[in-house]
Amino acid sequence: MLRILGVKMEGYDSGTMEVIYNLSNGSAGVALEMLSEDILECLEDIVALLLSPRPLNHLKIETIFDNWARSAPRTEPNWLEQKLLIVIFWMSQGIRRVAQDPSGGRENLSNENSLLKILVGLYGLSGMCEKLTKAEELIVRSKRLNLDRKETFFSFVGMLND
């Protein structure tokens, strides 16, 4: 599968291809979509943000949102929803991994295991599952009610941080 992706992912190193492959659960279509939307950079932004000292800096959150908005495809109206759902998927995978192996196993992103261990330590497994469920409900509700994207992003980060 990685060889097939290698043809489509020219210009990416083998480490990046392996991370994308792992995050996409081996789906070539999902992997290509993740690359086209700079998902690795988005996930790295979330890791850095949630590991930063409390209270979180609102300017930092706004800067991340603005960077995500600039990198979003102009033809994709649901870009924020897609990125946030991938963040939830990535976190849920990582939390399961930490639950199975307290060392966290092999990291897909720098400091990923540190963040996940901190979150599970603070909120427990059931608490993190509840947070991710509420975050997903927020995304669905914001789409249904046509809420402002920036407000949705700030609420999403707040849910993961509270």
Image (tube, rainbow, N blue to C red):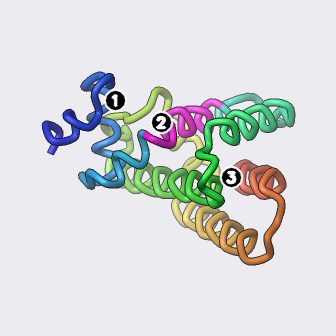
The residue under label 2 is 40
> Residue 152: percent from the left, percent from the top?
77, 58
- Amino acid type for the residue under numbered disc 3: Leu
The residue under label 3 is 160
Q: Nearer the viewer, residue 28 or 48?
A: 28
- Please report whichever mark, 2 or 3, sits nearer to the chain's N-terminal start: 2
Q: Nearer the viewer, residue 75 or 152?
A: 75
Query: Local crowd at mark 2 within 10 Å, few (<14), some, or many (≥20)?
Result: some
> Residue 117: percent from the left, percent from the top?
51, 42
> Residue 22: percent from the left, percent from the top?
30, 45
Instruction: From this view, report whether residue 145 is shown above or below residue 9.
Output: below
The quadrant of the picture occupied by the N terminus is: top left
- Amino acid type for the residue under numbered disc 1: Thr
Q: Nearer the viewer, residue 152 or 113?
A: 152
Q: Quadrant of residue 50?
A: top right
> Residue 58: percent from the left, percent from the top?
86, 36
Asked if the residue under mark 3 is in contact with the one under mark 1, i.e. CB atoms within 8 Å, the reply is no
Report if residue 62 lies within the magenta region: no
Magenta segment boundaries in residue numbering: 36-48
Instruction: From this view, report whether residue 130 is shown above or below residue 81.
Output: below
| Secondary structure at numbered mark 3 | helix
- Please report whichever mark, 2 or 1, sits nearer to the chain's N-terminal start: 1
Instruction: From this view, report whether residue 67 is shown above or below residue 129.
Output: above
